[in-house]
Amino acid sequence: MTTADGADEPGTVPETPVRPLARLLEVQDHDTVIDQIRHRRSTLPERTELTEVDRRLAVLDVRTKELRQQRDELGDRQGGLEQQIEASRTRRESLEKRLFGGQIVASRELQAMNEEVLHLARHISELEDREIEVMEGLEPLDRELDAGDVTRDALDKDAERLREAIATTEVSLDAELTDEIRARAATASGVRDDLLARYEQLRSKLGGTGAARLVGGSCSGCHLALSSMELDRVRKAPPDAVITCEQCGRILVP
């Protein structure tokens, strides 16, 4: 503890001031953690899964649109055939009533009406065959549409689950990020402006790492060994001298 006049009280160990370069390394550590959190946030596995689910939904929507268009066309054909069948049946029933009602006695007229009835019967049969073909064409379309609805429901549930998971994880990561940014700001306040500006410039050019430790004669930023001459220069430099790696240009902290 320090007394009012600036002297250390007897029996206390004076605090060792943190060197600017050591504090700069703390800033770098915070920046590294911040970058890692942001990377984790942008590359969540659930986000990749959600992208795939959205892609599958988009493909399914395109296919469903094609199927519905085909089904509508066949449905229109079926409707047209049903109208023709109904009209032909109505005409045949009307002719049969006249034919067997005893109102017409002329043989030529009776023969003409009978031939028309037979023609209508054949025509109705042909229309019914064509309607059956249309219905057979509708069946696989309906099956695929029904299966698509089931698949869409499952994909929608997956998408909802993934969005909830992403939102939950983002809240947690954002809280971590806020704490780390606050801690970084507090640490950076102890670094002089010119050194911090130089560090920021290097960090932006060198993949997020502007300051690196000197470990066993090697730069921990580029992992390359310094020359003997450079190591000797580092050892003889004043404690607060700003030294950069001769290989990568990062600020080196012994």
Image (cartoon, helix red, strand yellow):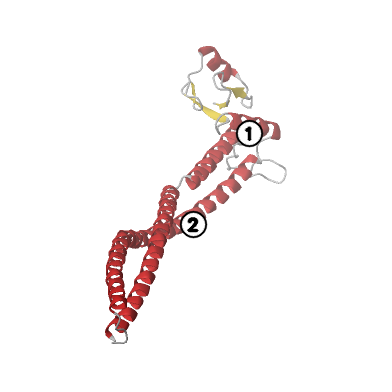
Report the front residue among 227 and 156.
156
Task: Name the spot of residue 226 as percent of width and height, x first.
Answer: 51, 17
* Element class at badge 1: helix
Residue placed furthest toward the top: 229
Q: Amino acid at mark 2?
A: Ala
Crowding at dot 1, Cα within 10 Å, few <14 / some 14-19 / many 20+, comes out as some
Which residue lies under the disc numbered 1?
200
Task: Name the spot of residue 223 as percent of width and height, x first.
Answer: 47, 24
Disc 1 and disc 2 in contact, CB within 8 angstroms:
no
Quadrant the N terminus occupies:
top right
Which residue lies under the disc numbered 2?
167
Task: Name the spot of residue 171 as percent of width and height, x first.
Answer: 51, 56
Taking the spot 31% from the left edge, 73% from the top edge, the residue there is: 112
Report the front residue among 200 and 80.
80
In this picture, is 210 found above or below 161?
Answer: above
Task: Name the spot of residue 143 as percent of width and height, x first.
Answer: 31, 61
In this picture, is 138 found above or below 56?
Answer: below
Question: Residue 211 appears in which quarter of the rendering?
Answer: top right
* Element class at badge 2: helix
Report the front residue among 1 and 159.
159
Question: Residue 18 appears in which quarter of the rendering?
Answer: top right
CA distance separating discs 1 and 2: 31 Å
Quadrant the C terminus occupies:
top right
Q: Amino acid at mark 1?
A: Glu
Is residue 6 toward the left or the right of residue 172 in the image? right
Report the front residue among 75 and 199.
75
Question: Residue 124 appears in which quarter of the rendering?
Answer: bottom left
Q: Nearer the viewer, mark 1 or mark 2?
A: 2
